[in-house]
Image (cartoon, rainbow, N blue to C red):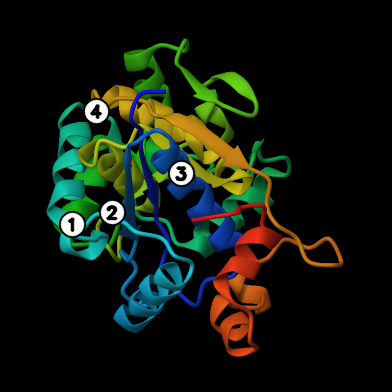
């Protein structure tokens, strides 16, 4: 096995739970078995929900698990220029368009359409701002109206073709089907980028060869593969693992107050116990 580069990239919106521990241990083990590198990246582009304190807690939890990673840790909030440069490249090619819609505007259009097209994450964006005339778009931009930037998927696929593929170790070769996400927002109006754009740029800049993450992000990979092609970036190998669930079969999630690694530690659990419970004999 050639040396691999893996990463664990949490958002610091709360404490880590067992599901995060599983992903981190899996990524760490994959890198170590190949004699490669394990990275930690803090995806903190959202200044409202993400805090430095939570980021420090994440690093504490990873250290408690016995993991070691390369320094420095990359904080996305410190690299917004990288994402802006990528967005500018796409915009110069006419692949992005400004979207002035509020959530209410989109919901109203969907309700009025009766049967709006659905993707893997719900109703697709109905294309209100894609249909604006050049004059109206220019006038709204000149007026300083807040806007996001969306990918014009039709133009993007005209550029890349429909034969893009990516590989998942569990599900095998996958043909990219970005139409499942439609004209996704790549530059949010409040933070100047988006998860989709930032993660693709970072994985390339950090030379990540293998991405270990939960299957809840499987669908997003269809869009990520298109962005990689548009930006001339390599496509890593993906390892989308099943999500951990509680006794009732519900996926572990911060919003549901899943037991945190800190609470487990304070209850007397030691890291070796948790690693064995999750199927990892050593870090």
Inter-mark Cα distance, 4 to 2: 15 Å
Residue that carries the numbered disc 4 in the rendered image = 231
Contact, mark 2 vs mark 1 (Cβ under 8 Å): yes
Inter-mark Cα distance, 4 to 1: 17 Å
Contact, mark 1 vs mark 3 (Cβ under 8 Å): no
Mark positioned earlier in the residue sequence (4 or 2): 2
- Reply above or below: 53 against 169: below
Inter-mark Cα distance, 2 to 1: 8 Å
Mark positioned earlier in the residue sequence (4 or 1): 1
**In x, y percent, where is residue 162?**
47, 12
Of tags 2 and 3, the one toward the viewer is: 2
- Residue at the image position 41 percent from the left and 60 percent from the top: 67
The image quadrant that residue 42 belongs to is bottom left
Indicate left or right for 104 with 225 as reference.
right
Mark positioned earlier in the residue sequence (2 or 3): 3
Of tags 2 and 1, the one toward the viewer is: 1
Of tags 3 and 4, the one toward the viewer is: 4
Does dot 4 land on a helix, a strand or a loop? loop
Residue that carries the numbered disc 3 in the rendered image = 128
Please identify the residue farthest to the bottom as the structure is shown.
266
**In x, y percent, where is residue 228?**
32, 28
**In x, y percent, where is residue 29?**
48, 45
Front residue of 170 and 165: 170
- Reply above or below: 152 against 103: above
Does dot 1 land on a helix, a strand or a loop? helix
Residue that carries the numbered disc 1 in the rendered image = 80
Mark positioned earlier in the residue sequence (2 or 1): 1
| Marker disc for residue 193 | 2
């Amino acid at each position: 096995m050639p040396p691999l580069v893996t990463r664990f990239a949490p958002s610091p919106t709360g404490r880590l739970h067992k599901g995060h521990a599983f992903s981190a241990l899996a990524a760490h083990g994959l890198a170590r078995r190949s004699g490669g590198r394990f990275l930690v990246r803090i995806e903190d582009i959202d200044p409202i929900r993400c805090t430095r304190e939570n980021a420090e807690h994440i690093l504490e939890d990873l250290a408690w698990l016995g993991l070691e990673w390369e320094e420095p840790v990359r904080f996305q909030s410190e690299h917004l220029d990288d994402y802006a440069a990528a967005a500018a490249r796409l915009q110069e090619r006419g692949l992005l368009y400004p979207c002035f819609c509020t959530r209410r505007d989109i919901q109203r259009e969907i309700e009025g359409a009766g049967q709006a097209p659905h993707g893997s994450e719900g109703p697709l964006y109905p294309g209100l701002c894609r249909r604006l005339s050049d004059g109206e778009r220019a006038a709204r931009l000149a007026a300083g109206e807040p806007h996001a930037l969306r990918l014009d998927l039709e133009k993007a696929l005209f550029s890349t073709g429909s034969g893009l593929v990516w590989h998942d170790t569990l599900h095998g070769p996958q043909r990219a089907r970005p139409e499942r996400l439609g004209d996704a927002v790549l530059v949010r109006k409040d933070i100047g980028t988006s998860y989709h754009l930032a993660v693709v740029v970072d994985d390339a800049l950090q030379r990540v060869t293998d991405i270990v993450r939960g299957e809840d992000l499987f669908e997003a990979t269809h869009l990520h593969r298109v962005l990689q092609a548009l930006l001339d970036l390599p496509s890593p190998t993906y390892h989308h693992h099943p999500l951990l669930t509680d006794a009732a079969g519900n996926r572990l999630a911060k919003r549901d107050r899943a037991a945190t690694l800190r609470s487990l530690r304070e209850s007397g659990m030691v890291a070796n116990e948790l690693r064995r419970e999750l199927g990892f004999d050593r870090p």
